[in-house]
Image (cartoon, helix red, strand yellow):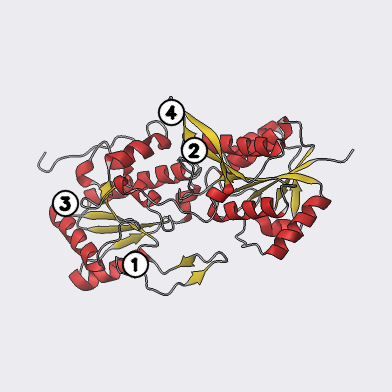
């Protein structure tokens, strides 16, 4: 009897919970009884083209449990914009290996790859996307697995940085925290969630791509005003931030463009710091948590871990039914909070689209999240995401 095979791949930037989706897809693929073998792509779609495949069929319960608690892409990852010839090559490999379904765990670009693979095989090899991105910019899903954990990490980092500045404003009058998020403001705005319920008077200033500042000079003015008011300022700066004229704070020429056409510019935080010092003489400390933002398993959201698992399971279940061309997205159920459920969305509705931050979520006067954003995002972080901190009023 010919073995029926499910193939699973991970693509793009890793997260704290991407392996929860992987473990779930492995478990569900075997539980359906439709697959005898589970293979994994080593290093994403690029690994598939080189036939770098690993057998995941016989992983033990303990190994799968440990996998769920492991950050990074356990299978390895890559960024590859596939050509038609490469898709045809991949389909030939899949047929030869008797692969009868594919689960891709990834973000925007993986959605496009899964859609093309499903279409080009004529549905012969169904492909389903389990969403993953800390940017939270996939459409047709309540949130993207990976985002809540990154948001929880970043919000705690910003709180800690603020208390550091509160204790020594003369040493750290300005902290600029540069964060990822591509061209969407979900993650930068999440950095201020630690001030949504307490200590709102010392909330960080947040800049988001969807509401670009009129000019760098207006950003400098906002920073100076906050220093005059509080004695210090912590500001969150997206790595892709441009002013209203479309000029990137790190310079208009990208240092690198990836295969999907995504540009990578010089540091926006450093660019703002230079302009601030030139205009005022004030030195700014620029902090870039970088990959730690998306990889911190110690501060992972339990909601994120659970839904990443459910999404991976739903993706494998769909493929086992011989159906593809969809994303296993997430929706809030009627008993929210804290209920969530999964829902299938056609990949044609997802690929090559970006979900921007809604206008109602950002207060561009206060440079802060609104109550509406807090109502959306705080439940995603899990119970008690922020430990209480003490503050002494001056003179006490």
Q: In whole angstroms, how far apart are the C-alphas of marks 2 and 1? A: 32 Å
Please state the horizontal and vertical placement of residue 178, each as a whole percent of the image: 37, 58
SS assignment at label 1 = helix
Q: In whole angstroms, how far apart are the C-alphas of marks 3 and 2? A: 35 Å
Q: In whole angstroms, how far apart are the C-alphas of marks 4 and 3? A: 37 Å
Q: Tag 4 or tag 1, which sits nearer the N-term?
A: 1
SS assignment at label 3 = helix
Q: In whole angstroms, how far apart are the C-alphas of marks 2 and 4? A: 12 Å
Q: In whole angstroms, how far apart are the C-alphas of marks 1 and 4? A: 40 Å
**Relative to residue 213, is residue 377 depicted above or below?**
above
User: What residue sits 55% from the left and 39% below the top?
Assistant: 308
Q: Residues within 10 Å of mark 4 (few under 14, many from 20)?
A: few
Q: Tag 1 or tag 2, which sits nearer the N-term?
A: 1
User: What residue sits 13% from the left and 57% below the top?
Assistant: 228
Q: Residues within 10 Å of mark 1 (few under 14, many from 20)?
A: many
Q: Nearer the viewer, mark 1 or mark 4?
A: 4
Q: Tag 4 or tag 2, which sits nearer the N-term?
A: 2
**Relative to residue 372, is residue 73 depicted above or below?**
below
Q: Which residue corresponds to mark 3?
A: 230
Please state the horizontal and vertical placement of residue 323, each as a whole percent of the image: 68, 40
Residue lying at the far right in this picture: please name it.
1
3 and 2 marks in contact (CB < 8 Å): no
Q: Which residue is at the front of the view, 381 or 35? A: 35
SS assignment at label 4 = loop
Which of the 4 image quadrants contains residue 326?
top right
Q: Which residue corresponds to mark 1?
A: 270
């Amino acid at each position: 009897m010919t073995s029926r095979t499910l193939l699973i791949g991970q693509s793009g930037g890793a997260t704290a919970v991407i392996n929860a989706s992987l473990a779930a897809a492995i478990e569900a693929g075997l539980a359906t009884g439709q697959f005898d073998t589970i293979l994994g792509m080593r290093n994403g779609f690029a690994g598939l083209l080189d036939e770098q495949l690993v057998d995941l069929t016989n992983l033990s319960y303990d190994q799968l449990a440990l996998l769920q608690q492991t950050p990074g892409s356990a299978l390895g990852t890559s960024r590859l914009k596939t050509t038609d010839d490469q898709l045809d090559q991949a389909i030939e490999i899949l047929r030869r290996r008797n692969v009868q379904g594919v689960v891709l765990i990834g973000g925007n670009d993986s959605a496009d790859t899964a859609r093309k693979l499903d279409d080009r095989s004529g549905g012969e090899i169904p492909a389903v996307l389990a969403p993953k991105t800390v940017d939270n910019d996939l459409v047709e899903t309540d949130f993207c697995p990976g985002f809540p954990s990154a948001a929880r990490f970043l919000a705690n980092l910003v709180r800690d940085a603020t208390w550091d500045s509160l204790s020594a404003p003369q040493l750290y009058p300005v902290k600029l925290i540069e964060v990822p998020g591509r061209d969407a403001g979900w993650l930068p705005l999440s950095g201020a969630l630690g001030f949504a319920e307490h200590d709102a008077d010392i909330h960080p200033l947040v800049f988001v791509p969807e509401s670009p500042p009129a000019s760098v000079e207006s950003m400098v003015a906002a920073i100076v005003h906050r220093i005059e008011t509080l004695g210090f300022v912590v500001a969150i700066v997206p790595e892709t931030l441009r002013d209203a004229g479309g000029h990137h704070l790190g310079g208009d020429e990208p240092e690198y463009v990836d295969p999907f056409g995504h540009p990578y510019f010089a540091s926006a935080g450093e660019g703002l710091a230079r302009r601030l010092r030139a205009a005022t003489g004030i030195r700014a400390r620029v902090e870039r948590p970088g990959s730690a933002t998306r990889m911190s398993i110690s501060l992972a959201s339990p909601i994120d871990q659970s839904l990443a698992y459910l999404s991976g399971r739903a993706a494998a279940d769909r493929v086992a039914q011989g159906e593809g061309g969809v994303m296993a997205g997430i929706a809030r159920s009627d008993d929210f909070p804290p209920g969530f459920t999964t829902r299938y969305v056609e990949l044609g509705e997802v690929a090559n689209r970006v979900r921007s931050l809604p206008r109602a979520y950002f207060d561009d006067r206060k440079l802060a999240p609104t109550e509406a954003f807090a109502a959306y995002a705080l439940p995603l972080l899990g119970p008690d995401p922020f430990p209480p901190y003490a503050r002494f009023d001056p003179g006490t």
